[in-house]
Amino acid sequence: MGQRLTGGEIVTGPSPFDNLTEDCVSNIISFTSPRDACVSCSVSKTFESAVQSDSVWEKFLPPDYTSLAPRSRVFSSKKELYFALCAHFLIEDGQKSVWLEKASGKKCVMLAARQLWITWGKSPEYWQWISISESRFEEVAELLNVCAFEMGGSMNARYLSTGTHYSAYVVYKLRKRRYGFRDLPVQVGVGFKGQEMPKKFICFDKSNDEHKPWPKKELMKSEKREDGWIEAEIGDFFNEGGFDEIDVSIVDITSGNWKCGVIIQGIEFRPKNHR
């Protein structure tokens, strides 16, 4: 028996999955996603039990998960390991932060500012390395006083999930005492080494004037994050796989304004349109 409601049908009585074995249900769930697996727990007791299977969560883990798993911990199940890897952890002497996107299992990476090349004048008077408690990394870069600057870096695509569309973001903070960046378009880009990098623009310190014109410049969106930092998207790319180098660039060499008050934590890569 069923009750028709707005074009759909609510079926009562025994579930069509009740006759399936738990192993069969586990195999079906493994072809979905971590988010779908968690939702399916409410379907039936069989599903709830099947979702706990190591065979399900091993499918959701990246192929190189054994190299990512903390060696100091023992995990009772692949599900426990999966959710442990969803919390960011540091690799390569603390210069990369790595984690899994909880809903999809895709790999995310943030490069520390120390892994970027930075050209802010020829003297330490223009910028400095500092430690702040809110950062994932031991040090972040603070712009002190400079007229023009360039920064960028590269990362091998093997750190990311294959067959995935990624966005790259610069993650930063603003000092209360700052100047020179208000409504200033700064050129940014991301792309594979050897290919033409699309030119876009961000604004580290945008005013509330929503009608301010940006002629011939596509201004990328900036927004406050839950961790208290600000992020600005610098572009996107599709990672087919392989060992290509991904380049990122942030450049302001034409404005002539003296600038101060930006703290750079790093560059973050995560699946496009996901947080």
Image: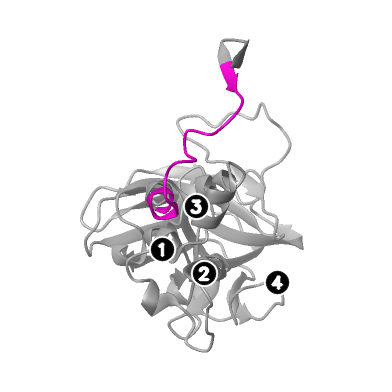
State the SS at label 1. Answer: loop
Which residue type does callout 4 highlight? Glu
Distance from label 2 to label 3 (Cα)? 13 Å
State the SS at label 2. Answer: helix
State the SS at label 4. Answer: loop
The residue identified by callout 3 is 34
Q: What residue appears at the point 30 percent right and 62 percent down from the top-left corner?
A: 157
The residue identified by callout 2 is 85
The residue identified by callout 1 is 61
Bin the neighbour count of mark 3 within 10 Å (Cα to Cα): few under 14, some 14-19, many 20 and up.
Answer: many
Q: Is residue 121 visible?
A: no
Of the 4 image quadrants, the one containing the N terminus is: top right
Query: Could you tell which of marks 1 and 2 lies nearer the N-terminus?
Result: 1
Which residue type does callout 1 highlight? Leu
Distance from label 4 to label 1 (Cα)? 28 Å
Which residue type does callout 3 highlight? Pro
Distance from label 1 to label 2 (Cα)? 9 Å
Bin the neighbour count of mark 1 within 10 Å (Cα to Cα): few under 14, some 14-19, many 20 and up.
Answer: many
The stretch in magenta equals 9-26
Of the numbered discs in the image, which one, if any, rests on residue 134? Answer: 4
